Amino acid sequence: MPYWVDIIVKLTPAFVTLVLGIVGSTIAYWQYRLGKLQHQLNHDRLRFDLFSKRLEAYEKLQHFFTEVVRTGTVEDKVLPVLGEAIYQSRFLFGDEISSRLDDIWKKAIDLRYCRHMLHEAGSLPVGPERTALCEKDGELLKWMMDQMNEAPGRYAKYLKFQ
């Protein structure tokens, strides 16, 4: 057998091993890259889902404020909207938002009660008690409007999608 054939026969297993090592390394590298990309996509998807849920809760709160400003009171049909916003916000936002939503809920109930006492059957007669209730009603409505105006700034850090 010629000398060069003997060299090829002896080098073939080493060459095949080298080629298989290169192919295996290339596959491992691309799996690593794909895993890294998949991790980034999962992270972005999680951030997007969280953003969507936060935006939904914020929009419900804004819907509540819009109805309060539009009607000048808290009607029975908008209390569940606020309730849903509070429920959705518990685990999506920080403690400062949760405590603020609790305050909004309490003031909404107070505003609803004031309007009921002022305008429903058996309302208060004209006098100092009714005047005080009217002033409280006006303060509560102004407070609600202030909260509506402050809400975008308060929620901004949670609604940035970067």
Image (cartoon, helix red, strand yellow):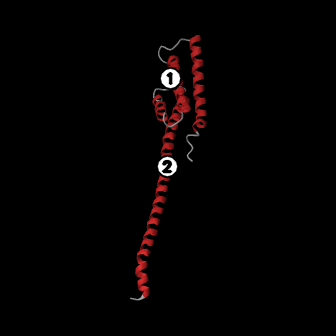
Q: Quadrant of the N terminus?
A: bottom left
Q: Secondary structure at mark 1?
A: helix
Question: Does 41 appear above or below 133?
Answer: below
Q: Residues within 10 Å of mark 2 (few under 14, many from 20)?
A: few
How far across and how far down the image is residue 38, in percent?
47, 54
| Whether residue 68 can be seen here | no
Residue at left offset 49%, top offset 49%: 43
How far across and how far down the image is residue 39, in percent?
48, 52
The residue that mark 1 highlights is: 109
Q: Secondary structure at mark 2?
A: helix
Q: Looking at the rendering, which quadrant does residue 5 occupy?
A: bottom left
Question: Does 9 appear above or below 92?
Answer: below
Find residue 133 and name its label.
Answer: none
Query: Between marks 2 and 1, how big is the CA–CA gap?
Result: 40 Å
Question: Does 18 appear above or below 155?
Answer: below
Amino acid residing under circle 2: His
Residue at left offset 45%, top offset 62%: 28
In the image, taking residue 150 as reference, residue 59 lies left or right, namely: left
Residue at left offset 54%, top offset 24%: 107
How far across and how far down the image is residue 65, in percent?
54, 32
Q: Residues within 10 Å of mark 1 (few under 14, many from 20)?
A: some
Mark nearer the viewer, 2 or 1: 2
